[in-house]
Amino acid sequence: MTGPARTIVTTPSDRTVAISRVFAAPRRLVFEAHIRPELVLRWMWGPDGWPLVECTIDARVGGRFRYVWRHVEKGDMVMRGGFREIVAPERIVHTELFDEDWTGGETVVTTLFEERDGRTSVTATVLYASRAARDGALRSGMTDGWSQALDRLEALLPALDRG
Amino acid sequence: MLAADLDATFAALADPTRRAILDRLARGPATVGELARPFTMSQPAISRHLKVLEEAGLIARERDAQRRPCRLEPAPLAEIATWLDSYRELWEARHRRLDALLDALQAPDPKDDRR
């Protein structure tokens, strides 16, 4: 037996962040969970308190998608993008941009799905517009980034002090 | 840590040879000669990588000792690990939900008469 699955985050180059994880499910199913809105709605949530509440996906090359995360007090966070490549069930290349851009411009995400012995490894590599954009997104952290986008950073600063 | 310092840290880490040098130094201090040995690279080339690592604050070199061994300076790496952790926590939470979803999708349907 192996231990619980681990999410691995690395910085393979100066403009990228890679997120890897192994799932106990066949590749076809894991792939579907990334492009079917009714499935994406069940897992692609934001930080605590930010469930994904709207999800529309036109899963074909040139198709667009739109995600809306909603916080009961802080309002909505919207991300949009488009598909550059969809090779079921192996590979997706898409762009992402938050309406309140806190990632230093559009990112390009390449997601690879590989199956071995009934388990599927997924690696998503996020390419930022520049090294500064990547570092900024990492430095603020996802949680801070979402808060900043809502112009609430000032109120949150004491709580976010990393000492 | 200042933003400029962090840029230097990330730039230093972007190179695979420099990451391999840091891996080696994580096991203890080493001289330039010892660090050059596993690589098909001259000592001057290794020295150039060490200079980048030193300027990024990732390693320190003894000034006095004749062999000037290099050692790892863990603070900048710890800083980066902290950022990566907050990013990873978000994705870990998502992946736990995806685990549960995939389990549910694979559970036998009682109404399904295949079994």
Image: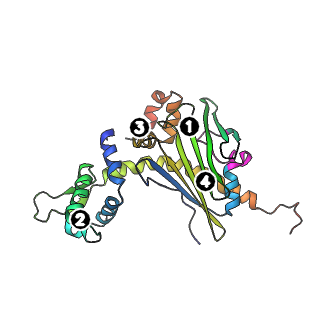
The residue carrying pointer 1 sits among few (fewer than 14), some (14 to 19) or many (20 or more) residues within 10 Å by Cα, namely: some
Q: Mark 4 points at which residue?
A: B95
Identify which residue is drawn at 56% across, 35% down.
A98
The residue carrying pointer 4 sits among few (fewer than 14), some (14 to 19) or many (20 or more) residues within 10 Å by Cα, namely: many
Identify which residue is drawn at 65% across, 64% down.
A24
Q: Mark 3 points at which residue?
A: A161
- Subunit that carries the residue with mark 3: A
Q: Distance between the Cα atoms at labels 2 and 4?
A: 38 Å
Q: Say which element carries label 4.
A: helix
Q: Mark 2 points at which residue?
A: B29
Which of discs 1 and 4 lies nearer the camera? The answer is 1
Q: Please check whether the numbered discs 1 and 3 fall on a single chain.
A: yes
Q: Position of residue B32 (x, y in %)?
A: 20, 65
- Subunit that carries the residue with mark 4: B
Q: Say which label, 2 or 4, has the lower sequence index.
A: 2
Residue type highlighted by circle 1: Leu
- Subunit that carries the residue with mark 1: A
The residue carrying pointer 3 sits among few (fewer than 14), some (14 to 19) or many (20 or more) residues within 10 Å by Cα, namely: few
Q: In this view, does B10 lie to the left or right of A99?
A: left
